[in-house]
Image (cartoon, helix red, strand yellow):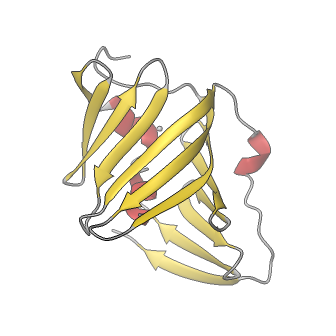
C-alpha cells in the first residue's frame, strides 16, 4: 500500500488534475479472503499530496520531497526517501484505453484510472496480489493549504526508511 504513495498527481490521452485538488475517498483492499475499507480525504497542491485517513483509524501521509507517515495511535512518524515520481507525472503519462478508462505503467505495475472531467477512481493489483481500489467523491478544484504543513507532536518516535 505504501508504494502507491511513493508514486502516488495537455495531452489528448493524458489526465491532468488542476494545481489544487481535494476529494473524499474510500480505499478498499481485497485479498483472497479479506476486504478492508479505509476512508478519508486527499489534498493536492502542485506536486504535493496529503492523504488524511479518518477510518478505521487516523493516519496522515504527506507526499513531499520525502514521504511522512504519521500514525497517532502508534505515536510514530515514518519518514521515507522516495523516488522522484509524482502523481502528476503518472497521470500525465496515462494512456486512454476507452471512454473514461486510462492506464499508466509505473514500476512494472499497471495503474488504472477512471477520469471523466475529474478523477473518479484508481485501481491496481499490488505486489502481494491484493486488489486496491480508491474511489474519489466530492471532488473540488481547491484545497486547504494549511494541511500541507507537517503537523505531529515533537516527541513521537521517528523511523527512517530508504527506498530506491
Is residue 137 toward the left or the right of residue 132 in the image?
right
Near-viewer residue (66 or 115):
115
72 lies above or below 102: below
Which image quarter is the N terminus in? bottom left
Is residue 123 toward the left or the right of residue 48 in the image?
left
Is residue 108 toward the left or the right of residue 87 in the image?
left
Coordinates of residue 157 in the picture (x, y in percent): 68, 85
Which image quarter is the C terminus in? bottom left
Near-viewer residue (83 or 44):
44
Near-viewer residue (103 or 99):
99
Number of numbered callouts drawn = 0
Is residue 68 toward the left or the right of residue 94 in the image?
right
Q: Residue furthest top?
A: 12
19 lies above or below 117: below
Identify the residue at horizontal 77%, vertical 69% (top origin): 152
Identify the residue at horizontal 65%, vertical 70% (top origin): 70
Coordinates of residue 25 in the picture (x, y in percent): 56, 44
Which corner quadrant of the image does residue 87 belong to? Answer: top left
Coordinates of residue 27 in the picture (x, y in percent): 48, 52
Coordinates of residue 125 in the picture (x, y in percent): 27, 56
111 lies above or below 100: below
30 lies above or below 76: above
Residue 124 shows in this picture? yes
Which corner quadrant of the image does residue 137 belong to? Answer: top right
Q: Residue furthest front?
A: 33
Identify the residue at horizontal 73%, vertical 82% (top origin): 156
Residue 84 shows in this picture? no
Amino acid at each position: 500500500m505504501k508504494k502507491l504513495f511513493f508514486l502516488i498527481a495537455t495531452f489528448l490521452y493524458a489526465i491532468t488534475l488542476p494545481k489544487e485538488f481535494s476529494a473524499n475517498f474510500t480505499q478498499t483492499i481485497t485479498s483472497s479472503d479479506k476486504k478492508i475499507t479505509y476512508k478519508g480525504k486527499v489534498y493536492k497542491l502542485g506536486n504535493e499530496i496529503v492523504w488524511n485517513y479518518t477510518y478505521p483509524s487516523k493516519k496522515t501521509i504527506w507526499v513531499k520531497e520525502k514521504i511522512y507517515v504519521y500514525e497517532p495511535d502508534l505515536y510514530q512518524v515514518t519518514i521515507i526517501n522516495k523516488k522522484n515520481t509524482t502523481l502528476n507525472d503518472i497521470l500525465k503519462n496515462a494512456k486512454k484505453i476507452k471512454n473514461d478508462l486510462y492506464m499508466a505503467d509505473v514500476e512494472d505495475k499497471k495503474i488504472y484510472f477512471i477520469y471523466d472531467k475529474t478523477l473518479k477512481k484508481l485501481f491496481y493489483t499490488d505486489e502481494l496480489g491484493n486488489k486496491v481500489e480508491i474511489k474519489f467523491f466530492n471532488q473540488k478544484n481547491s484545497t486547504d493549504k494549511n494541511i500541507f504543513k507537517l503537523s505531529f507532536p515533537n516527541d513521537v518516535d521517528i523511523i527512517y526508511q530508504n527506498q530506491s
